[in-house]
Every structure is written in C-alpha cells, then in structure tokens.
Amino acid sequence: QVQLQESGGGLVQAGGSLTLSCAVSGSGRSTNTMGWYRQAPGKQREMVASVTRGGATDYAESVKGRFNISRDNAKNTVTLQMNSLRVEDTAVYYCATGVWFKIEPPDYWGQGTQVTVSS
C-alpha cells in the first residue's frame, strides 16, 4: 500500500511562485512514476508533470518552461516548483504515483491541495 502526503499550495498573485511537495510511503512498481495532476472547477483532471525513478520528466504543454518537477529517490519525495503562475493555474493539485502515466492512470492519489492564483 502506498500513501501520499502533500504539502504546499495556497494563494498567490499572478506572476508569483509556489512549491508543492509530496512525501510517498511505500515502494515498488506503483512508485516508478511520481507526479502531479490538477483539476479546476468544471474541468477534467489533467496531468501537470511527472518524473520516473530514472529521472525522465514529462510536462503538460501549458506549464512547460514555468514548472519544474524533481524527485528525491532516497527520501521518496516529489516536488513541483511552479513559477510565473497564471490565473488559469488555479486548481486542486493532486500528487500521484503509478507505473507510467503515459500508458495507464496512476495507482495512488493524494488528497489534493488547493492552489489559487489571483489577478
């Protein structure tokens, strides 16, 4: 069983920065990929960024160049550094782990943390 505990998030003005962190307990294939999804009101949940155990990263087009995902395999943590935030980045952000997000959805999810970007 894998458990995820998110921290960070909050309210920030457009153009500002926030950092989200996620501590993952558990190991195995279901932690091969770690990442973040988000869901805005009235919209579907979407993948924001992911990183594999080997360090391969993937980003949504809308966040490329602004967000950076990193992973500490020794500490079993994943961090999302969000810069140049926009109002449209407002959403609940979920930490997630799985085998590989490109081929199947995550196996485990965090409870979510709210990110609100004001204009």
Image (cartoon, rainbow, N blue to C red):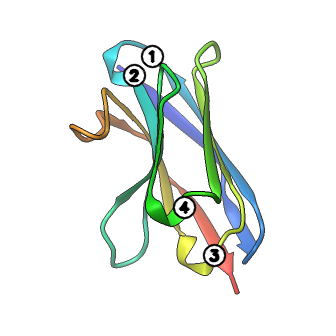
Residue 93 on image: x %, y %: 50, 56
- Distance CA(mark 4)–CA(mark 3): 10 Å
Q: Give the image quarter of residue 30.
A: top left
Residue 86 is tagged as 3
Identify the image quadrant of the C terminus: bottom right
Instruction: Give the residue pinned by disc 1.
Output: 26
- Distance CA(mark 1)–CA(mark 4): 29 Å
Name the residue at 58% across, 42% down. 6
Mark positioned earlier in the residue sequence (4 or 3): 4
Instruction: Give the residue pinned by disc 2.
Output: 32
Q: Give the image quarter of residue 33.
A: top left
Q: Amino acid at mark 3?
A: Arg
Residue at the farthest left position: 104
Q: Is residue 17 left or right of residue 65?
A: right
Q: Amino acid at mark 4?
A: Val
Identify the image quadrant of the N terminus: top left
Q: Amino acid at mark 2?
A: Asn
Q: Amino acid at mark 1?
A: Gly
Residue 63 is tagged as 4
Residue 50 on image: x %, y %: 46, 40
